[in-house]
Image (cartoon, rainbow, N blue to C red):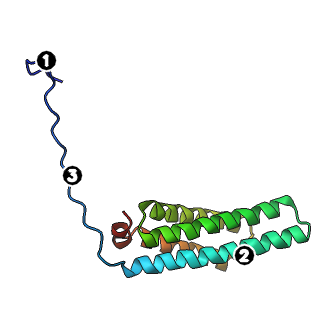
Amino acid sequence: MADNGTGRKPPLRPRYRPPEPERPATRPASVWVVALLLVLFGALGAVIGALVVEDAVSHGEEARVVAAGVFAMLLAGTQVVAGVGVFVGWAQGRVLAMLVCVANVVLVILAAATDRLGSGQSWLAVAFYGALLFGLAGPKIHAWCR
């Protein structure tokens, strides 16, 4: 930087930042819907994951079946936490919800590619998580989660 003759650098000019819109006074309906779907399907996934683990352990299945059930429970638990985060308005909750949706879409595509899921199940899951991603990327949820 140029010296102004006093041996000091000139003061920094503040950068202009456009003002951010205020958070809505009431929780938008889209936040209610997305958070409720995340929590309900996350809880359902956790219960199903627990049933898979219990059944695999009681029938002496391979360790990878038990690991898949535990992974499903962890992913479902993360989805519940993300749903609560979106409902409360945490920015990290929205990001976590988006990551969980992307992870679920990737896992569904992998399961469909290896013939572990039927095409109807695959399309339904991709459409569901795609709709959740669309809602999470929307302006109302973005404005709520700060």
Q: Amino acid at mark 3?
A: Arg
Residue highlighted by disc 3:
17
Element type at mark 2: helix
Q: Residues within 10 Å of mark 3 (few under 14, many from 20)?
A: few
Left or right for 93, reference 26 = right
The image shows residue 119 at horizontal and vertical percentages of 67, 76
Residue 69, numbered label: none
Q: Is residue 38 positioned above or below 97 on the image?
A: below
User: Measuring 87% from the left and 67% from the top, which residue is drawn there?
Assistant: 57
Left or right for 144, reference 121 = left
The image shows residue 131 at horizontal and vertical percentages of 49, 75
User: Measuring 20% from the left and 56% from the top, which residue is drawn there?
Assistant: 18
User: Measuring 81% from the left and 63% from the top, which residue is drawn there?
Assistant: 66
Q: Amino acid at mark 2?
A: Ile
Which quadrant holds residue 80?
bottom right
Left or right for 62, reference 17 = right
Residue highlighted by disc 1:
7
The image shows residue 108 at horizontal and vertical percentages of 64, 68
Element type at mark 3: loop
Q: Amino acid at mark 1?
A: Gly
Can you say which quadrant of the picture contains the N terminus? top left
Q: Residues within 10 Å of mark 1 (few under 14, many from 20)?
A: few
Q: Badges 2 and 1: C-beta atoms under 8 Å apart?
A: no
